[in-house]
Image (cartoon, rainbow, N blue to C red):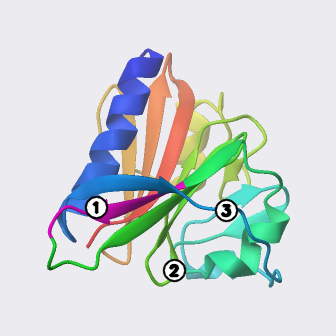
Amino acid sequence: MNVKKLVSLFLVLLLVASVTAGCAGKKEDVKDTTQDAAEAQSEEQGFYVTINGTNIQIGMAFADVKDKLGEQTQPEEVMHSCDPDSDWQQTVHYYADAEVTEDKDGYINSVWVKGETASVMGKIKLGTAVDDVKALMGEPSSEDEYSLMYVAEGEIWLSINIENDKVASATIIKME
């Protein structure tokens, strides 16, 4: 699977999440600010991604982990609904090995692992064999030649994108 397919798959997942709240529209750059960091939640509470030694889960306050994630590789982007009656908003934060999206209330609602130093569940990295993923995670909720899909708590999804029987990228996302 090439890079275009990976990016397309991630965009489809993000679009599905955004359609439930409103359509994505205008973007604006936001000045980077720093906040105090807090400890990450435990793995017992669902899927997590590790970036720079910090565990991140869907539903965590972005402000609690922002300082631990390292430097952003480009300015964050704020997306608003094109529906004037909707207050839907998401902010995408770009890092070397991952992209973290937060909702209008400041809570993380997706994490896309796209680089070699970030991991899912502490062990799944880019290049991990599909058989090793299944040994760690069990059988997926759905599977095809391009991806493994796991669902936790009904609305938190882990999508593992596959190329040549190895992990090419992974996304944890809240589907509402």
Element assignment for label 1 = helix
**On the image, numbered disc 3 is attached to which residue?**
31
Placement of the C terminus among the 4 image quadrants: bottom left
Task: Count neighbours of disc 1 (C-alpha within 10 A) and say few if under 14, some if 14 to 19, many if 20 or more.
Answer: some
Q: Is residue 123 visible?
A: yes
The tag earlier along the polypeptide, 2 or 3, is 3
Whole-percent x and y of residue 20? 18, 68
Between tags 2 and 3, which lies in front? 3
| Amino acid residing under circle 1 | Ala
- State the extent of the magenta-drawn residues as a range: 77-83
**On the image, numbered disc 2 is attached to which residue?**
59
Specify whether 5 is left or right of 64: left
Element assignment for label 3 = loop
| Amino acid residing under circle 2 | Gly
Which mark, by number, is residue 74?
A: none
For the point 68% across and 40% down, the residue is 125
Q: Are marks 2 and 3 in contact (CB under 8 Å)?
A: no
Q: Quadrant of residue 63?
A: bottom right
Q: Nearer the viewer, residue 129 or 12?
A: 12
Q: Quadrant of residue 169?
A: top right
**On the image, numbered disc 1 is attached to which residue?**
17
